[in-house]
Image (tube, coloured by chain):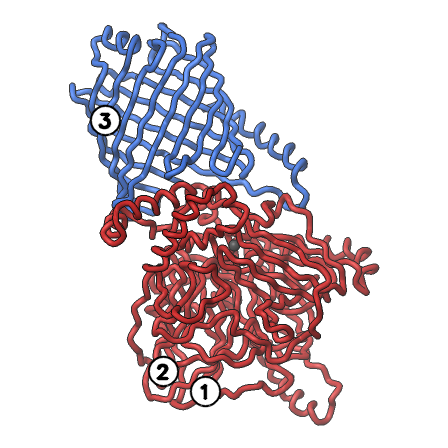
């Protein structure tokens, strides 16, 4: 987080430096900000695994340029360690009506070795209201990987919302040190039923999550005595401020 | 206010004598307004907001045509404020738009507005700073004409509609930027899908949903901001503002829509309304059962309740998510039934402006599909009363085209004809196309694809007559407001076209208005939906070459410092 805070003023200066190029009126561009926590949940796995998982996202900036922090993590409650922990800071700009590109850095620091990555990403809204977020990562070890997240909302009512989601992690070469094999590494599918209790600011949910590791990654996991695929029951809440 | 009232009273006396003895005497009233933090109680919630003289809405300012008004505005807020006199023709330095007409009124400062009143009728005033207007900073203006009014009335009430939201304007804007559908709680759900399947079959329903989904737009997107409580003169539906009448009296109602975002369909079940003025200018009387008042518009109507009973003034929001309610009654405390809201409209493909540029990518086969879904849209929207005449100010097949709840006459812009044209009719000297553009998903609103912050001012020449061509390429209805000069709405009536200050442009339509450029200086020109204006559907207009323009340039420094 500290590096993010240091970067923030620098990036804001970048806005003001960029602004005069396009701005003709004396009004400066409006600056907006927001924080969303899409997942903030307790997961109970088949074999008695207990996890705490979160997926959050904050931004500040204009319509044209935003600084976006994305963070997610999975904490294993039983063994008291982070299975995954990642923070990403990127600049984001629109490239079409519904799509943005972003570029920045990611830092993963779960139990075990840490990694820095350079990131480029594409996010937006695909036809039929499918939210898409994808990234291409190049690690400090020169390894290339990618992820893809998709989400859709089914309105059972205007407050009771069923959200199927899916994500895929792919590596183009293996990084044995952090337990990543080349190929499709893992797939996670979720189905969450939420209710908007307080505007869209607080929406508790229950759901299920299925996670499956593949190939070498699965081998690495199984070597540690864990199962390569697992079902979780989840309970948590979404936040938006 | 007391001091002001006394002064106004003594002036009134002088006036009466003056009319015969001193014809040269000019009325000169002084009015004091304070801008304050206030509490607004809607009956459903209480919210801190901004008001004038300790209240929201602020007072009714009663001016006289020909008066030279002095208005002292003291800012008791801890932020800059401003007052714009909506619809008043005045020198641009008095127009009250920060950064365009003046620097704004700093905290603790008092700014003195001074200008002659050169018109009459129903108008209003509001802050033009930040989101103070949605937060409650508005009031009304009633200007008594020099000449006798061209209609009779025994009672006279201001009926000011607003849409008070439990969230502050700033918060609403931020939420819309985070999720454009943040406040849309009337989206089509799974059960709507199943009932449509039952009605129209599976194939049609899926195709229809896919057409909207393909565009990533929502048929339910009529009101960006829902969850507000509509108020009449600051009172919610349960607080029931009441105007007293004696049966058979003619009651003049001055409808003003000071909402941030909400159009209202207004009716008084059991009464016909005779529209006698629009945006403060007399129109040839037209009797209707219902009318739609766009944001920032005003209409004066005369009603004549004959029976000794109460009548409900009912204003359903255009998207049917809420209603305003007031009462006309012979005695205090009487109420009438509150009518049901008619069915909630849905946008159709016609509202998506199929003819316009943003739909270029569509091929013929999908056009056919769309036509089909249009028809469906028409079926379940409120087209009951539409049989004979279509409203030219809505796209053909529009889901928004209004119909009177009782099947009677609904006011159309086409019905508005000036009582007495302000200007001699002549051909416009030039046409300017203003495409109303936006991106709902990003909540960006613009003109010709350019937001205010990126736009060059629009330059007009003093003395020209400009024809504005508004092409609405978005799915929203935009009330376009030009400051300082009249917008003569082209309803096809030539010299009888009505002069307005706010022109509502429905989705998928092209609307023309003409402006006699007779006011030099710099002016604002914008969509009057608060969050559209702030997002960028706004232009600065500069009128050049006027008689005073030489001195104007040199004095500009002084004015703007
Ligand atoms: Cu608008």
What is the secondary structure assignment of the residue under circle 1?
A: loop
Q: Is residue B366 visible?
A: yes
B150 with respect to A214 (left or right): right
| Quarter of the rendering occupied by the N terminus of chain A | top left
Residue B329: image tag: 2
Tags 3 and 1 on a common chain: no
Please name the residue that numbered disc 3 is placed on. A43
Q: Is residue B175 visible?
A: no
Query: Which quarter of the rendering shows the C terminus of chain A?
Result: top left
Residue A189 pos. (x, y %): 27, 26
Q: Nearer the viewer, mark 3 or mark 1?
A: 1
- Asked whether mark 3 and ligand 1 are closer than 8 Å, the reply comes as no
Chain B colour is red
* Number of the label disc, if any, that sits on residue B250: 1
Q: Are marks 1 and 2 on the same chain?
A: yes
Image quadrant assignment for residue B316: bottom left
**Mark 3: which secondary structure?**
strand
- Where is residue A230? Give x, y as percent: 21, 20
> For residue B66, which numbered disc appears in the image?
none
Q: Nearer the viewer, residue B512 or A135?
A: B512
Query: On the rendered structure, is B496 left or right of B213?
Result: right
Q: Quadrant of residue B325?
A: bottom left
């Amino acid at each position: 987080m500290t590096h993010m805070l240091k970067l923030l003023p620098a990036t804001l200066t970048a806005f003001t430096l960029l602004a005069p190029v396009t701005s003709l009126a004396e009004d400066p561009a409006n600056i907006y900000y927001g924080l969303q926590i899409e997942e903030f949940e307790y997961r109970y796995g088949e074999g008695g695994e207990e996890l705490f998982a979160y997926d959050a996202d904050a931004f500040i900036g204009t319509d044209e340029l935003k600084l976006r922090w994305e963070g997610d993590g999975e904490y294993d409650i039983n063994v008291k360690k982070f299975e995954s922990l990642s923070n990403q800071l990127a600049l984001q700009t629109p490239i079409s009506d519904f799509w943005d590109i972003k570029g920045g850095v990611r830092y993963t620091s779960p139990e075990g070795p840490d990694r820095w990555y350079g990131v480029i990403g594409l996010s937006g809204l695909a036809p039929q209201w499918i939210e898409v977020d994808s990234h291409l990562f190049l690690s400090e070890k020169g390894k290339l990987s990618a992820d893809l997240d998709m989400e859709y909302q089914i309105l059972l009512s205007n407050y009771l919302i069923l959200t199927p989601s899916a994500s895929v992690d792919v590596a183009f070469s293996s990084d044995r040190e952090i337990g990543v094999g080349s190929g499709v590494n893992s797939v996670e599918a979720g189905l969450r039923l939420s209710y908007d209790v307080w505007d869209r600011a607080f929406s508790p949910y229950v759901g299920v999550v299925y996670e499956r590791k593949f190939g070498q990654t699965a081998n690495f996991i199984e070597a540690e005595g864990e199962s390569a695929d697992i079902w979780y029951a989840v309970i948590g809440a979404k936040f938006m401020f | 206010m007391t001091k002001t009232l006394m002064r106004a009273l003594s002036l009134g006396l002088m006036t009466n004598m003056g009319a015969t003895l001193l014809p040269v005497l000019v009325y000169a009233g002084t009015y004091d307004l304070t801008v304050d933090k206030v509490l607004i109680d809607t009956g459903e919630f209480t919210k801190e907001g901004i008001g004038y003289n300790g209240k929201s809405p602020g007072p009714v300012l009663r001016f006289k045509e020909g008066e030279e008004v002095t208005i002292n505005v003291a800012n008791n807020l801890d932020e800059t404020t401003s007052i714009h006199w909506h619809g008043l023709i005045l020198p641009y330095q008095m127009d009250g738009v920060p950064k365009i007409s003046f620097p704004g009124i700093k905290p603790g400062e008092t700014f003195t507005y001074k200008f002659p009143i050169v018109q009459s009728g129903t108008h209003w005033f509001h802050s033009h700073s930040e989101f103070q207007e949605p937060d409650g900073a508005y009031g009304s203006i009633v200007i008594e004409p020099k000449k006798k009014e061209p209609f009779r009335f025994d009672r006279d009430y201001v009926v000011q509609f607003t849409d008070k939201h439990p969230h502050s304007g700033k918060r609403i804007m931020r939420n819309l930027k985070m999720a454009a559908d943040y406040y849309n709680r009337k989206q089509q759900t799974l059960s709507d899908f199943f009932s449509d399947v039952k009605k129209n079959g599976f194939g049609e329903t899926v195709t229809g949903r896919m057409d909207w989904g393909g565009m990533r737009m929502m048929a339910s997107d009529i009101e960006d901001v829902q969850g507000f409580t509509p108020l009449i003169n600051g009172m919610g539906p349960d607080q029931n503002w009441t105007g007293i009448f004696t049966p058979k009296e003619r009651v003049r109602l001055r409808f003003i829509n000071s909402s941030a975002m909400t159009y209202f369909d207004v009716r008084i079940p059991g009464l016909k309304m005779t529209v006698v003025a629009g945006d403060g200018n007399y129109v040839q009387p037209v009797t209707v059962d219902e009318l739609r008042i766009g944001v920032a518009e005003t209409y004066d109507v005369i009603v004549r309740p004959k029976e000794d009973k109460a009548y409900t003034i009912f204003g359903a929001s255009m998207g049917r998510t809420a209603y305003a309610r007031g009462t006309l009654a012979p005695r205090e405390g009487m109420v009438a039934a509150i009518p049901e809201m008619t069915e909630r409209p849905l946008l159709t493909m016609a509202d998506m402006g199929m003819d316009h540029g943003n739909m270029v990518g569509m091929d013929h086969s999908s056009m056919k599909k769309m036509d089909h879904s249009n028809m469906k849209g028409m079926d379940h929207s409120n087209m009951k009363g539409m049989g004979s005449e279509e409203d030219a100010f809505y796209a053909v097949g529009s889901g928004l085209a209004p119909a009177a709840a009782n099947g009677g006459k609904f006011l159309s812009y086409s019905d508005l004809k000036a009582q007495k044209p302000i200007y001699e009719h002549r051909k416009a000297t030039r046409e300017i196309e203003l495409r109303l553009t936006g991106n709902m998903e990003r909540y960006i609103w613009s003109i010709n694809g350019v937001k205010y912050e990126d736009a060059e001012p629009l330059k007009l020449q003093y003395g020209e007559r400009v024809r504005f061509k508004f092409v609405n390429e978005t799915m929203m209805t935009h009330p376009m407001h030009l400051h300082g000069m009249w917008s003569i709405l082209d309803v096809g009536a030539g010299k009888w076209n009505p002069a307005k200050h706010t022109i509502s442009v429905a989705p998928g339509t092209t609307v023309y208005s003409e402006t006699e450029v007779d006011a030099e200086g710099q002016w604002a020109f914008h969509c009057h939906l608060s969050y559209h204006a702030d997002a960028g559907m706004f232009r600065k207009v500069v009128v050049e070459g006027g008689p005073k323009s030489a001195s104007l340039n040199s004095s500009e420094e002084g004015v703007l410092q």
